[in-house]
Amino acid sequence: MFKGLMVTGRRRVYVFDASAFIEGLEGLAFEDQVFTTPEVVEELREAEVKGRSELARELGRVRVESPRLKHVEEAERAAFQTGDFSRLSKADLSLLALAVQLRAEGLSPTIVSGDYAVQNVAEQLNLNYASTLRIKHRIRWLTYCSSCGRSFPPGFRLECCPTCGGRLKRKPLERGKAGGGGKRLGN
């Protein structure tokens, strides 16, 4: 599954987001180097997941690196181009930027993420990616104001409430069984 492939003469490496650690992929037998960023490590909140990621770093299976500013700016430009910038966290942007940096250093990075916005920006940057998660439910989202409680139709695209200026959030409005599309990394 995770063999040390050479892609166009470049050594393959993996760049993990939080979902890869949550799924426990850092514990698999990799012949390739795994990278992540300090921002992704900060997102790991559950004790078990944090413990596994710390052990993987101590054993040298995972390297934590910060991308250089010029690569962060490149990732941000791509996110603006795709319209995903507002959906990406600082950790998401950092892992995209690290993948760009690793490619510039002559490696062949594959981002491992279950985040569709990350995957979309990776496409824009011509980066390889693999999904850690296969969706189990099809979800229709409701956007609502966390301050005044006003609801907005699915797909509403503002970040602030037009009534009170409060922050808008999303919550599942209805769930249905997913059709089973997509392949989970590792299966």
Image (tube, rainbow, N blue to C red):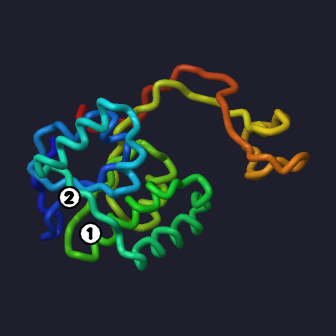
Q: Nearer the viewer, residue 114 or 179?
A: 114
Separation of residues labelled 2 and 1 (CA atoms): 9 Å
> Looking at the image, which residue is at 17% across and 41% down?
55
Q: Nearer the viewer, residue 23 or 164?
A: 164
Q: Position of residue 38 (x, y in %)?
A: 35, 57
Identify the amino acid type marked 1: Leu
Q: Position of residue 128 (x, y in %)?
A: 32, 58
Q: Which mark is residue 102?
A: 1
- Is the residue marked by circle 1 packed among few (<14), some (14-19), or many (20+) residues within 10 Å? many
- The residue that label 2 is drawn on is 13
SS of the residue under disc 2: strand
Which quadrant, please, contains the N terminus?
top left
CB under 8 Å between discs 2 and 1 = yes
Q: Position of residue 92 (x, y in %)?
A: 45, 55
> Looking at the image, which residue is at 52% across and 25% down?
137
> Looking at the image, which residue is at 26% across and 69% down?
102
SS of the residue under disc 1: helix
Indicate left or right for 90 with 161 as reference: left
Identify the amino acid type marked 2: Val
Q: Quadrant of residue 85?
A: bottom right
Q: Position of residue 175 (x, y in %)?
A: 61, 22
- Is the residue marked by circle 2 packed among few (<14), some (14-19), or many (20+) residues within 10 Å? many
